[in-house]
Image (cartoon, rainbow, N blue to C red):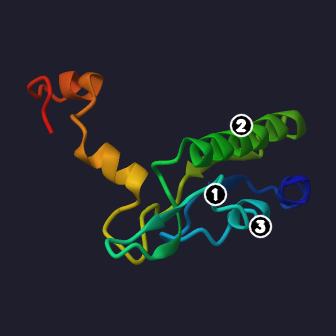
Amino acid sequence: MDLLVTQAREHKFRLVLLWFGTWKNGQNHYVPEWIKSDPKTYPREENAYGKLLDVMSPNSPANLDADKTAFAALLRHVKTIDAAHTVIMIQVENESGSVGSIRDFSPAAQKQFDAAVPAEFARAMRLPTGAT
């Protein structure tokens, strides 16, 4: 990041960063190896037939926490090195989604899928309470 910001300044450019985080083109290619190698802590999606996919589960609190922690660290670092505002924008989660399935069918995801719509969301969408 430091090199990108320095080089952009040298050439009088501004930067728009692209945060891949959990997904990039529907797969986890840019996820750190220590997360990829620990699917018990950082679960993958499963397709309808139980096959594990090369996609981080969006239904995992651990996956969300890891992504939020990394993103916050990036923002703090950019703030410390970029008082000149060379970085003008960050696009969050480019092309999120799932390659190999229409959604996560893991047991945890299925439990959420079968549950009632969260009350706060139902109110915001003007849905009846307890909608599924």
Quarter where residue 24 is shown = bottom right
Tell me which amino acid carries mark 2. Answer: Ala
- Measured from the top left, where is residue 104 in percent x and y? 38, 61
Front position among marks 2 and 1: 1
Numbered disc 3: secondary structure? helix
Q: Which residue is mark 3?
A: 33
Q: Which mark is residue 40?
A: 1
Q: As displayed, is residue 65 above or below residue 100?
A: above
- Where is residue 4 drawn, in percent x and y? 84, 59
Q: Residue at x 34, y 63 (%)?
A: 103
The reply, left or right, for residue 131 in relation to residue 68 is left
When the figure is inspected, residue 58 is found, relative to residue 116, above or below; the finding is below
Q: Are marks 1 and 3 in contact (CB under 8 Å)?
A: no
What amino acid does circle 3 point to? Glu
Label 1 secondary element: loop
Disc 2: CA contacts within 10 A as few (<14), some (14-19) or many (>=20): few
In the picture, residue 101 is in which quadrant? bottom left
How much space separates mark 1 and mark 3, taking CA atoms? 14 Å
Q: Position of residue 20 (x, y in %)?
A: 62, 60
Q: Is residue 127 left or right of residue 66?
A: left
Cα distance, mark 2 to mark 3?
Answer: 19 Å
Q: Which mark is residue 2?
A: none
Sequence-wise, which precedes: disc 2 or disc 3?
Answer: 3
How many numbered marks does the figure carry? Answer: 3
Residue that mark 2 sits on: 72
Q: Earlier in the sequence, mark 2 or mark 1?
A: 1
CA distance for labels 2 and 1 = 24 Å
- Measuring 40% from the left and 72% from the top, which residue is drawn there? 50
Q: Residues within 10 Å of mark 3 (few under 14, many from 20)?
A: few
Instruction: List the single residue furthest toward the left.
Output: 128
Query: Given this view, does label 2 or label 3 mark the residue nearer the observer?
Result: 3
